[in-house]
Image: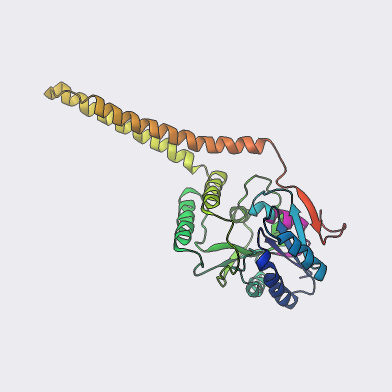
Amino acid sequence: MNCISVIIPVRNEADNLDELTRRLHSVLPQLSAEYEIVYVTDLNQDETLHVLRRLNGENPRVKTIKLSNAFGQHVAVMAGMAIATGDAVVIMDGDLQDFPEDIPLLHQKMLEGFDIVYGTKTHKNDSRLRNLLSRSFVKVLRLLTDFNMDLNTCMFRIISRRAADAVLRFKERDPSLTFIMGMIGFPTTKVMVTSGKRLHGNTSYGYWRQLNLAISSIVSFSTKPLRIVSLAGLGVSGLALIHFCFALTKWALFGVPVAGWTSLAALLGLVGGAILFAQGITGEYIARIFMESKDRPLYIVEEKIGFSEEKRA
């Protein structure tokens, strides 16, 4: 394997970069004489970009792609893949929860003939609430999509150059690399890796961003929500018809007066809520059609640090 590229999306990780880079420099020479560490960043409130410039000055193998705006973590990884030159591409987080020392495990498995080898963890060192939400998110995805995801799948993985090139053919907005790599269908396996703990700073992947990722993943890779809404609408209509027939039968056979305002208000509230819910789901799909139709670029590179002109565009 001629060259290994490590792609790391970072934001506000200035305190973690020196330690992470040092450990990568210790591990990667064991795998290949040629390697590069490609950090991808965008908008920072700390000295992340300054630290990355210094790291490049200390070792030209450390390179940086500065995006002009916050286009998202998965888009940042795709920007790195488009510019990286490695025959194998390692993707990992920059908060030290992914151990550089586990890269040889992924690499060794790839040498057995796999194009995609992702890390899976026995547990994640997050709060109980975050772990619960993460597991719930994956279980919902399993129900609503046709993909079978491992409960402990993480961003940490190694992929072949042909897999990276296949991923780059997907131009959709709000991409989910996990699902895209699953759709490609190249030989894939998993390796148990260490679950580290963030040493400095706070995660920028809050609960709202997790919810947004869940909605985007479901809407982008499945039409099952639309079918569920259709079935739910049919079910509500059926219940309304049963209620109507029951009330009409009581009145016709037993002279029992039909309860008016309460039943009507409850029925209207149920139907109105179902309609709004259905419109919301439909609106999510329409909004994505609208955004895709604009054909805007996925990202804009503001600056490249450490790349020569002959490298990949």
- Give left or right: position of 154 versus 65: left
**Residue sitting nearer the eye, 160 or 176:** 176
The vertical placement of 203 against 24, above or below, is above
Q: Residue at x 46, y 56 (%)?
A: 133
Where's residue 91, x and y in %? Answer: 66, 63
Tell me which colouring the rendered structure shows.
Answer: rainbow
Q: In which quarter of the image is the N terminus?
A: bottom right
Q: Residue at x 77, y 67 (%)?
A: 55
- Give left or right: position of 163 versus 239: right
The vertical placement of 37 against 269, above or below, is below
Q: Can residue 53 be seen in this view?
A: yes
Q: Can residue 59 be seen in this view?
A: no
The span shown in magenta is: 77-89
Where's residue 235, x and y in %? Answer: 35, 36
**Residue sitting nearer the eye, 311 or 130:** 130
Where's residue 151, x and y in %? Answer: 49, 61
User: Does the magenta portion include 85?
Assistant: yes
- Give left or right: position of 245 versus 176: left
The vertical placement of 136 against 261, above or below, is below
Where's residue 97, x and y in %? Answer: 59, 68
The vertical placement of 61 against 296, above or below, is below
Q: Which residue is drawn at 13% across and 22% down?
A: 255
Q: In which quarter of the image is residue 193?
A: bottom right
- Give left or right: position of 130 versus 303: left
Q: Which residue lies furthest to the left in this view?
A: 254
User: Does the magenta portion include 66?
Assistant: no
- Total label count? 0
Q: Quadrant of residue 54?
A: bottom right
Q: Which residue is drawn at 16% across and 21% down?
A: 252
